[in-house]
Image (tube, rainbow, N blue to C red):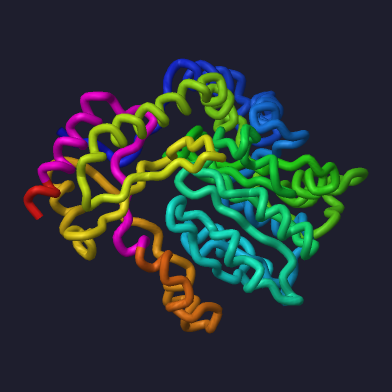
């Protein structure tokens, strides 16, 4: 048996809408009604006034930085353990990301460590709801209010996750989602920006579509970007939203299965769901400890040999040679993230994973643990 690390749940809901878009010829970002429908339904899902469909989660983050007016010389607080899109987006505008270490249970940014990193140049905090688990947002928002900072939520992995019964992506100033193929809901490639601020929404809608003029389309208002999502992709997104509750239920069932069947392995740290959180378990992330610590490569290879695909953890921002060489980071400033990242990986967690596959993966994990 081969169990991929992720595969999306696609079916008639998506196929029927894509066929309509193709049969009518409405496939671009300026044709057909699926983009408007996708945006309106996504805004309702998150509980915000505005949702703007874009070409990727990275594009969403870049547009958020621009909309908030962040510029060269400014600093933004970021979690060091994240996909590098969270770091690249500020750098596109020459905004300096300042790394903060993680909370040892959720692996999200540790709010207790933020204030010591704030300087006169700090203009914003970016939080990342890592692996579908919400960040502890109340202290973040209090710090932001105290220091007059913007808050960007990178919710790329967390569609439907809730912090104290409030959807992520609607708590900070701007939320950013990815719709890549392995995300909670997908359009293949794509993203979404969410906000309750009319001014930010208008600016993002304009900039993402080449900043066309209002009275004369080709008299551009500013430097714009082609960050549009196509109607074909939006058709898939509408179909995904139609079954998003089912998708989230499947994700939580997947996590529940692993938590039940792997909890007897003392050398593996399993995911933690904080009391304030409703996690959507984008990926089932584990950390090797004790006898298995430092043996991640061996562990991954042994599972691969048995047909179980895995992914190793992100390399933290502060350990990226590119940024160490540029002097942005020191390489040793976030020790907890370094420790967990070197021993972390995630198991097959796709939305379409079957119970038979879950059973097989769990059995193989036990087998590998016993043989290493």
Above or below 305: residue 247:
above
The residue positioned 61% from the left and 36% from the top of the image is: 230
Residue 200 appears at what percent x and percent y?
80, 48
Above or below 181: residue 256:
above
Quarter of the C terminus within the rendering: bottom left
Residue 346 appears at what percent x and percent y?
32, 47
The quadrant where residue 93 appears: bottom right
Quarter of the N terminus within the rendering: top left
Magenta portion: prevailing SS class: helix
Q: Does the magenta segment cover residue 350?
A: yes
Q: Nearer the viewer, residue 60 or 317?
A: 317
Q: Is residue 348 visible?
A: yes
Q: Does the magenta segment cover residue 70?
A: no
Above or below 141: residue 348:
above
Q: Nearer the viewer, residue 58 or 329?
A: 329
Is residue 138 found left or right of 131 in the rendered image? right
Q: Nearer the viewer, residue 308 or 273?
A: 273
The quadrant where residue 294 appears: bottom left
Q: Is residue 32 visible?
A: no
Single out the residue that lies furthest toward the left: 371
The residue positioned 56% from the left and 25% from the top of the image is: 241
The residue positioned 62% from the left and 32% from the top of the image is: 165
Q: Nearer the viewer, residue 164 or 296?
A: 164
Boundaries of the magenta span: 340-367
Residue 319 appears at what percent x and percent y?
42, 73
């Amino acid at each position: 048996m081969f169990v991929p690390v992720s595969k999306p749940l696609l079916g008639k809901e998506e196929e029927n809408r894509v066929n309509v878009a193709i049969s009518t010829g409405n496939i671009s970002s300026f044709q057909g009604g699926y983009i408007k429908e996708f945006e309106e339904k996504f805004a309702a899902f998150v509980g915000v006034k505005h949702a703007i469909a874009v070409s990727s989660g990275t594009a969403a983050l870049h547009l958020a930085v621009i909309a908030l007016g962040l510029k060269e010389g400014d600093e933004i607080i970021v979690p060091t353990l994240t996909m590098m899109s969270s770091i690249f987006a500020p750098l596109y505008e020459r905004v300096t990301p300042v790394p903060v270490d993680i909370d040892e249970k959720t692996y999200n940014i540790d709010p207790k460590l933020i204030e010591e990193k704030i300087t006169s140049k700090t203009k914003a905090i970016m939080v990342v709801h890592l692996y579908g688990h919400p960040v502890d947002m109340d202290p973040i928002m209090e710090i932001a209010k105290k220091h007059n900072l913007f808050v960007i939520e990178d919710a790329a992995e967390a569609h439907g996750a809730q912090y104290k019964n409030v959807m992520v992506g609607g708590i900070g100033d701007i939320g950013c989602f990815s719709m890549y193929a392995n995300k909670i809901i997908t359009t293949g490639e794509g993203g979404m920006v969410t906000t309750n601020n009319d001014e930010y929404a208008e600016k993002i809608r304009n900039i993402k579509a080449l900043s066309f003029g209002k009275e004369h389309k080709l008299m551009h208002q500013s430097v714009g970007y082609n960050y549009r999502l196509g109607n074909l992709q939006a058709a898939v997104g509408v179909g995904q939203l139609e079954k998003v509750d089912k998708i989230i239920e499947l994700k939580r069932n997947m996590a529940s299965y692993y938590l039940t069947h792997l909890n007897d392995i003392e050398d593996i740290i399993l995911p933690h769901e904080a009391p304030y959180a409703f996690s959507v378990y984008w990926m089932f992330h584990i950390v090797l400890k004790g006898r298995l610590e430092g043996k991640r490569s061996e562990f991954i290879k042994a599972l691969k040999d048995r047909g179980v695909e895995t992914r190793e953890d992100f390399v933290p921002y502060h350990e990226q040679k590119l940024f160490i060489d540029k002097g942005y980071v020191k390489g040793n400033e976030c020790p907890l993230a370094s420790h967990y990242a070197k021993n972390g990986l995630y198991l097959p967690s796709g939305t379409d994973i079957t119970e038979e596959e879950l059973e097989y993966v769990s059995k193989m994990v036990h087998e590998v643990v016993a043989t290493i």
